[in-house]
Image: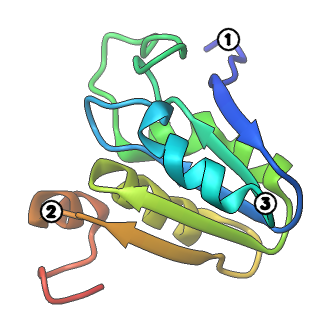
Amino acid sequence: MPDVQPYTREAGSGPGVVCIHSNASTSAQWRALIDLLSTSHRVLAPDLYGSGKSVDWPSQSEIALLDEVKFIEPVLASAGTPLMLVGHSYGAAVALLAALYSGEAAPSIYRTGMSNSAKACAGVGSANNA
């Protein structure tokens, strides 16, 4: 696959926060949070494959959550450390996998609206687990 980078909204400076949008959404979902946090943090919000201004998934195979993680790795790396991941629904599952597969110390994660199906895809068990 060619080396492509996701379109990423970016604002502010300070500790890194990466906001990962829900399915059928874009990084625009995070505009208000970006405005709020960018006074004290460097906030990055990538568009996942096929969303917003990012490229479509370049394969005939079904996309997996780990494919999304690999796609946003350059964004995660540029956010630096310490890093906080914020994800909503599908984005929360992507954030969880990004944290699990990172070679660094586990980043902070804040999830919103992670459905049971997203948790099952991410392998985190029942809806009672955070």
Image spot of residue 107 (x, y percent): 65, 76
Q: Tell me the residue that label 2 is attached to.
A: 115
| Residue name at image x 22 percent, y 67 percent | 119
Name the residue type under label 1.
Answer: Pro
| Residue name at image x 26 percent, y 29 percent | 24
Image spot of residue 91 (x, y percent): 38, 50
- The 10 Å Cα crowd at callout 3, few under 14, some 14 to 19, many 20 or more, is few
Disc with the residue nearer the chain's start (2 vs 3): 3
Q: Is residue 60 left or right of residue 55?
A: left
Name the residue type under label 3.
Answer: Thr
Tag 1–tag 2 contact (CB < 8 Å) = no
Mark 2 or 3: the one toward you = 3
| Residue name at image x 32 percent, y 10 percent | 60
Callout 1 secondary element: loop
Q: How many marks?
A: 3
In the figure, 27 relative to 116: above or below? above
Q: Nearer the viewer, residue 95 or 112?
A: 112
Q: Quadrant of residue 42?
A: bottom right
Extreme residue in the bottom direction: 128
Image spot of residue 124 (x, y percent): 27, 76
Q: Tell me the residue that label 1 is attached to.
A: 2
- Please identify the quadrant where the N terminus is shown: top right
| Residue name at image x 21 percent, y 58 percent | 118
Q: Tell me the residue that label 3 is attached to.
A: 39
Q: Quadrant of residue 75?
A: top right
Q: CA distance from mark 3 to mark 1?
A: 35 Å
Callout 2 secondary element: loop
- The 10 Å Cα crowd at callout 1, few under 14, some 14 to 19, many 20 or more, is few
Callout 3 secondary element: loop
